[in-house]
Amino acid sequence: MLQQILKELAATNTTLVAVSKTKPIEAIQAMYDQGQRIFGENRVQELVEKEAVLPKDIEWHQIGHLQTNKVKYIAPFVSLIHAVDSLKLLKEINKQAAKNDRVIDCLLQFHIAEESSKFGFDEAEVTAMLKSETFKEFENIRIVGVMGMATFTDNEAQVKQEFRQLKSHFDTLKDTFFSTDIHFKEISMGMSGDYQLAVSEGSTMVRIGSLLFGSR
């Protein structure tokens, strides 16, 4: 399944994040042996434990809601933090990145779903944050794009509309704040059940777990 999905995504230059949360070391190693190098985890403790024992050329992505008090544990090695949903969190990531003499790549999470349980900014909040003096002082984070989760529904039209909304947020931010920034290029949207829809709406990065590893 991995090779099939990689081949499919290669045609659109879309990055695959293999969501390995709750999966054992052996399952991740087996996927690594097939050539996969980018893995996503949502629990900090699990991520730290896996990073310690698995190959060092793995790119680890923190994909779930991240609490500020947990940032210090992943700051030494994390490649990308997908779900930045507050200025407070960004401030902590910048602080911990500085302590580790790193610049950490981050995605701004937008709330695009109808479900209130999902986290994320709206466009006005992101605009205010990016214009703030606090944000301008950050030297150890790099905003490389946006991320969002569609509503969990069988209504394809709704899911497409939500993905389209995220792409629109990306385009607005690119034009307004990041027009000369070559690093601002990622739209992380799409999971096992809807990644093909997401790719058709402009996703550059999909987070796939159950299709690769089997259902939890």
Image (cartoon, grey):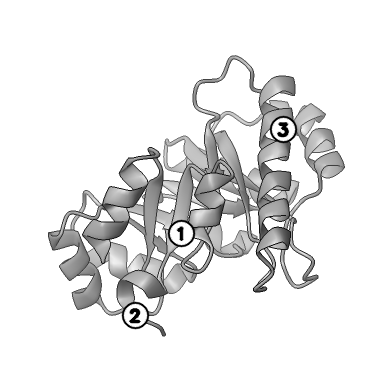
What residue is drawn where x is 46% and y is 59%? 207
Q: Which residue is mark 1?
A: 207
Marks 1 and 2, how far apart at CA: 14 Å
Let me know if residue 95 appears in the view. Answer: no
Foreground tag (1 vs 3): 1
- The amino acid marked with disc number 3 is Phe
The numbered mark, 3 or 2, whose residue comes first in the sequence reads 3
Tell me whether circle 3 and circle 2 mark residues in contact (CB < 8 Å).
no
Q: Where, quadrant-wise, is the N terminus in this rendering? A: bottom left
- Left or right of 31? Residue 13 is right
Q: Earlier in the sequence, mark 1 or mark 3?
A: 3
Residue at (63% x, 60% y) in the render = 149
Label placed on residue 135? 3
Identify whether 21 is placed above or below 57: below
The crowd level at tag 2 (other Cα within 10 Å; few <14, some 14-19, many 20+) is few
Where in the figure is residue 150, as x and y percent of width and height? 66, 62
Label 3 element class:
helix
The reply to whether residue 56 is in sight is yes
Viewer-proximal residue among 15 and 136: 15
Residue carrying label 2: 214
Q: Are marks 1 and 3 in contact (CB under 8 Å)?
A: no
Q: Vertical placement of 142 versus 199: above or below?
A: above
Nearer to us of marks 3 and 2 is 2
**Residue under the image location 21 percent in, 52 percent down:** 56
